[in-house]
Image (tube, rainbow, N blue to C red):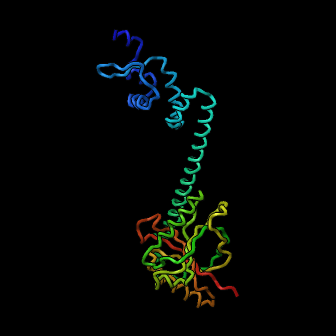
Amino acid sequence: MKNNKKKNKMSIGRFAKLSGMTIKQLRYLDEKGLLKPKLRDANNRYRYYSHDQLDRLVLIKSMRDLGVPFAEIVRLFESNSLETCLNILQQQADAINHQMQEAMLTYKQCMSYILQIMLYQGLLSSHQYRKNSWESTISIVEVPLQSVIFTRHVSNIFADNLFLERYFELKGICHKANLLITESLHAIFHDGYMSQFESRKGDLETFFPIHSPIPDNVPSRQYGGYQGVQCMHIGHYKHLREKYLHLEQWAASRAVKIKPWSIEIYLLGPDITPDPDCYVTQIIIPIEND
C-alpha cells in the first residue's frame, strides 16, 4: 500500500533537481503553504512530489525571480485570476522602479565622493599649501549664483568641535525630499568668521547647493552672485585662524575691502576621511561692493 502511494511520486531531492530549486527552498515553500508535497511519509516525514506540481512551481519561481512577496503569490493562487496577476506585476514594477531611482541617487553620490578625492589628492601631496608661500595660494574668485537647501539657527560653532549635527540635519532634509547632493557642505558664520575661535554658540547657516528642482516645502534660497577672496586650508578646522589672518593681510595690502563674515566649503571632511590631517577646506570672504 505504501509503495502504491509513492508510485509516480518524486523524492524532494529529485524534484529539486528537476525544478532547479534547492531542497531548502522547497521546504520553505512548504512552510509558507505555497507548495505542499503530495505525500509525507508517516515514518520518516520525507516529502514526495508529483510531476503535475511543476506547473504551480514554475509560477512561484517566476514571481519570486521578480521579487514578488510570498503573500502576493498566495493571493494570486487564491484568486486564480489573470487580472490579479497583472495588478501584482504592476505594483512590483513600480516598486522596482523606485528602487532603481534610489540606487541611481546612491551611485551618483558615490561618484561625487570619488571625484572629490581624486580632485584634491594632488593638493594634499603638494607642499604649496603647507609652507610659507601662503600669498601665492590666495586669489579672487567669482561665487556663482545658485540654489541651495539651507538651515540657519544658533548652534555650536566652535572650531575645536565639529558641528556634525547640522550636517545630519541637512542630509535628512535632502533624503526626505529625494534630492541628490553632489557638492560639499557649505557654512556661513553670520556673527563673523573669527567667532568660531572665540565662542561656543553662534548664528550658523549651513547649506548644500542643489542642481535639480527643489520642492516648495523645502527651505531653499539663492546664494552667491558676488566676488570673494579665497584660499585653501589643509588640516583640522581648529587651525583655520591663521588662514583668516593671511586673508585679512592679503586684502589689506591690496586695498580690497572684505566683509566680516565668510563661507567655508568642506571639500574633504569627516564624511569622506577619518584623518583630520586630510581635511581640505575652501575659505571665501566676500568683497565689499563700492
Task: Locate the C terminus and report the quarter of the image it occupies.
Answer: bottom right
Q: How many marks?
A: 0
Report which quarter residue 76 is drawn in.
top right
Vertical placement of residue 148 versus 29, above or below: below
Query: From what the image shows, is residue 137 above or below residue 220?
Result: below
Is 132 left, or right, of 188 in this rendering?
Answer: left
Name the one closer to the observer, 282 or 76: 76
The residue depicted at 62 percent of the width and 35 percent of the height is 87
- Name the outermost residue toward the right: 290
x 61%, y 67%: residue? 149
Residue, far left: 43
Residue 155 is situated, as x and y percent measured from the top left of the image, at: 50, 76
Where's the N terminus, which quadrant? Answer: top left
Please say whether residue 113 is visible from this viewpoint: yes
Q: Where is residue 245 drawn, in percent x and y?
A: 51, 86
The residue at 51%/31% (across/down) is 74
Q: Position of residue 134 (x, y in %)?
A: 51, 82
Residue at (43% x, 30% y) in the render: 29
Q: Tell me, yes or no, if residue 125 can be seen here.
A: no
Along the viewing direction, whichever of 33 and 274 lies nearer the viewer: 33
| Residue 94, percent from left and from top | 61, 43
The outermost residue toward the front is 78
Asked if residue 256 lies left or right of residue 15, the reply is right
Residue toward you, 25 or 245? 25
